[in-house]
Amino acid sequence: MLKSDASVTGGELVTYLIDLDNEKHAAALMRVTEVMRGCRELGLAQFTIRAGGHVHIDLHGLTAKDLWAQYTVYKYLELVIYHLAGAGAAYGHRALEGSTYCNPGPDGPFGTVGKFATKMLRNHGHDYRYALHFNNFASAKERCKCGAYMTGEWAECECNLGKATAEWRVFNAEINPRILHGWLAFVQALTAYTTDMENFNEPDFPALPWDGKKLTAVGSGKKNQIKERLEFIFRELPLTVHERDSLIYALKRSALVVLGEDYLNDLINVEQVGGFGAKKAAPNPGSRKEVVFAIDGGTGPVEVTEYDGDEDPEWDEVDLEPDDEF
Ligand SMILES: [Zn+2]
């Protein structure tokens, strides 16, 4: 749906909760990217530095310690994430062009989960513009009726807390579906990796903070730090081979291409040590409004294009006919 937003002209395009394991949901997202690409080609929509791509991840059932780990690993990767989040734009991340709608949050190390919570989990206690923030989650726990939050046993809560999300504001506004696939897979894999993390040890993840600088040439010290982070992503995070491929596609269209296409292509060969845990059932299935993705009527199911090699998608196939089901 398109909703009004004071910070951008036109509006903000918003989806309900989507589950990209569900073919219909994935196809609906593809369909939206087709339509938006068509709007841009016709001059009906622009993606300027004023617009960002915001990814919300449902945090029902997660604990403060999970979020401490999540934020710490985010900070460990922050410089890489900002450049990755500028993929597809010639100027790179929109912050480099003066956008102030996505700022790095507080730096760690925090030392204890309590000190982390003081900085990042107070209700309305911090800036909603942080590149990754948990404001919605911090507010949503007030809707717990079972008492689990009162006693600190957050993982035990089975209440529907509504929009209890982590918001990743770091991404540019982008509609290339392969870049979006890489971004979404990365955010989900980082969340999965840091949830119920065994032996989380904050000093293992020293921050590599966003420096607000263009990455035109990289000195060897910084280059090694960036490579260490990239290899961590491909070694540790639970990404499928297709997700790894889309992530490399996005990296090659970001400022990180200064590392060389050969280096980035070779990341596909980094041996993965992390396994795939079983996917947990959603604790609040009733709030997932699947009906909005019922797209089988109208013009029929969306055809999902297969991409091979490094060629850009065939955009001239975009169907601009409005679909009644949307
Ligand atoms: Zn509860």
Image (cartoon, helix red, strand yellow):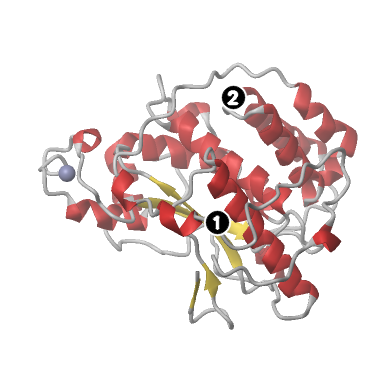
Tell me: is circle 1 under 8 Å from ligand 1.
no
The vertical placement of 87 against 21, above or below, is: below
* CB contact under 8 Å: marks 1 and 2: no
Q: Residue 295 carries which label?
A: 1
Judge whether residue 10 can be spotted in this image.
Answer: yes
Look at the numbered disc 1 and give the secondary structure of its residue: loop
- Res. 100 image quadrant: bottom right
Q: Which of 155 and 220 is in front in this view?
A: 155
Between the residue at mark 1 and the residue at mark 2, the CA separation in whole angstroms equals: 36 Å
Look at the numbered disc 2 and give the secondary structure of its residue: helix
Q: In this view, does 77 lie to the left or right of 44?
A: left
Q: Label 1 neighbourhood size at 10 Å, few (<14), some (14-19), many (20+)?
A: many
| Image location (x, y in percent) of residue 282 | 35, 38
What residue sits 70% from the left and 47% below the top? 304
What residue sits 32% from the left and 44% below the top? 285
Judge whether residue 122 can be spotted in this image.
Answer: no
Query: Which amino acid, mark 1?
Result: Ile
- Res. 59 image quadrant: top left
What residue sits 49% from the left and 44% below the top? 19
Query: Which amino acid, mark 2?
Result: Glu
Q: Which quadrant of the frame does ligand 1 lie within?
A: top left
Q: Label 2 neighbourhood size at 10 Å, few (<14), some (14-19), many (20+)?
A: some
Tell me: is circle 2 under 8 Å from ligand 1.
no
| Image location (x, y in percent) of residue 5 | 48, 78
| Image location (x, y in percent) of residue 131 | 52, 56
What residue sits 10% from the left and 43% below the top? 147
Q: Mark 2 points at which residue?
A: 236
- Res. 197 image quadrant: top left
Q: Is residue 8 left or right of residue 308?
A: left
Q: In this view, does 301 lie to the left or right of 114?
A: right
